[in-house]
Image (spheres, rainbow, N blue to C red):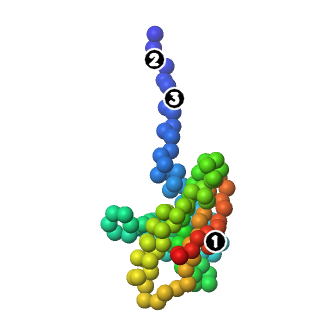
Amino acid sequence: MGFLPTKRQPRPRTTKQSGDAGEALALQHLQHAGLKLLERNYRTPGRGGGEIDLIMRAPDGTCVFIEVRQRQSASHGGAAASVGGVKQRRIVFAARHYLMRLATMPPCRFDVVAVEAGAIEWLPGAFDAG
């Protein structure tokens, strides 16, 4: 009796792969809306710093710091609700670090792009630096 070839099951996506795919989708959406990419996955040096998924320039010159969140479903509050106070403080910390490199301070805002079940929800001005 011979062996039958078995079909290899595709490996499930890692969380990183899913996040990267969501980020790429968000980037494409924002570029289509007229924003220009300045930095992707900007990180502050050292431990305990912050990371910003996308830093973009809006058509009016505003520097936009964007957190991209992806969820398979809206359970547990959904993607946008997952950007809590601690995450916001880390994003603001990283944004300040980024802005220190610039000669002049542009107007800024913090947006969230939620990717849920393939749908994109862009929330401009989702939170403040305060």
Residue 66 figure quarter? bottom right
Q: From mark 1 to mark 3, how far is it between C-alphas?
A: 45 Å
Q: Amino acid at mark 2?
A: Phe
* Residue 129, image x, y percentages: 53, 75
Q: Nearer the viewer, residue 17 or 114?
A: 114
Tell me which label, 1 or 3, sits earlier in the chain. 3
Tell me which label, 2 or 1, sits earlier in the chain. 2
Quick one: SS at disc 2? loop
Relative height, residue 54 to residue 57 (above, below) = above
Q: From mark 3 to mark 2, how far is it between C-alphas?
A: 12 Å
* Residue 97, image x, y percentages: 41, 76
How packed is label 3: few (under 14 Cα within 10 Å), some, or many (20 or more)?
few
To which residue does mark 2 refer? 3
Quick one: SS at disc 3? loop
Q: Amino acid at mark 3?
A: Lys
Q: Which disc is residue 124 wearing?
A: 1
How packed is label 1: few (under 14 Cα within 10 Å), some, or many (20 or more)?
some
How packed is label 2: few (under 14 Cα within 10 Å), some, or many (20 or more)?
few
For image coordinates 61% across by 59% down, the residue present is: 80
Quick one: SS at disc 1? strand
Residue 60 figure quarter? bottom right
Q: Is residue 73 visible?
A: no
To which residue does mark 3 refer? 7
For image coordinates 46% across by 10% down, the residue present is: 1
* Residue 87, image x, y percentages: 49, 63
Q: Amino acid at mark 1?
A: Pro
For image coordinates 65% across by 50% down, the residue present is: 74
